[in-house]
Image (cartoon, helix red, strand yellow):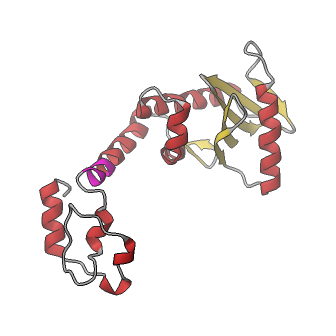
Amino acid sequence: MISYLLLISRQGKVRLAKWFVTFPPKSKAKIVKEVTQLVLARRAKMCNVLEYRDTKVIYRRYASLFFVCGVDANDNELITLEIIHRYVEILDRYFGNVCELDLIFNFDQAYAILDELILGGELQESSKKVVMSVFQSHGTVVEKLRSPFSGMLLLWFPPPGRTHIRLDQTYSFNQIAASDFHVVEETLDSTLNAAGLV
């Protein structure tokens, strides 16, 4: 079972940390610090598996990032390396040649992809196509919602004194009161139909 997965830059900065086993915050910080020091101190020709306390640390370097997994002592190292590689392949396909900046600015998507791939420290879905289909359909919906009008949420909250809103106008949350919550279902349906979202 995978206990944690860390993405660490060559400078020792943690870019992503996913914990599948509960640790106190101090233990997490100590593990991250010690594992980072161990991995960064190793040369390129050294083995990608090392022992740490009563677990194994398995890592693989891709460009400027180290993908590090902490696993049980009796887990198969090759399967863990393959899981890391599968995650990188999916990230590459999703972002188009993924780089460190993609993970910094789109960390939520990186976590979501990881959650689709690994559940509770075990491989949940091994098919790249299945994982990608989930995120391609999700990405299409998000882009459709973002592109025609940036404030889609405001369709549900007309400003005071109005029963409708204009899609080409932006409203601040100061202009919206909870008592002004009003849904014009016909207008919303026709707007979504016109935008091709329904």
The outermost residue toward the bottom is 179
Which range of residues does the magenta coloring cover?
Answer: 142-147
Q: Vertical placement of 35 versus 176: above or below?
A: above
Task: Judge from the rendering whether residue 182 lies leftward or rightward of residue 57; answer left or right.
Answer: left
Corner quadrant of residue 83: top right
Vertical placement of residue 160 versus 138, above or below: below
Location of residue 95 in the rendering, given as x and y in whole percent from the top left corner: 43, 33
Residue drawn at (77%, 34%), measured in percent from left and top? 36
Q: How many marks?
A: 0
In the visual, does 107 lie left or right of 47?
left
Residue drawn at x 81%, y 32% as measured from the top left: 37
Q: Main secondary structure of the magenta part?
A: helix
Which is nearer the eye, 45 or 83? 45
Q: Residue furthest right?
A: 53
Image position of 102 (left or right of 53): left
Indicate whether residue 11 is drawn in magenta. Answer: no
Residue 114, how many percent across, how many down?
54, 42
Quadrant, the N terminus: top right
Q: Is residue 161 left or right of residue 119?
A: left
Q: Position of residue 31 (x, y in %)?
A: 80, 43
Compared to residue 194, the image places residue 106 above or below, namely above
Q: Quadrant of the C terminus?
A: bottom left
Determine if residue 1 is in view. no
- At a point 30% along the width and 50% down the height, the residue shown is 141
Q: Residue at x 33, y 51 (%)?
A: 142
Q: Position of residue 13 (x, y in %)?
A: 69, 37
Q: Residue furthest top?
A: 45
Is residue 155 among the parts visible in the rendering?
yes
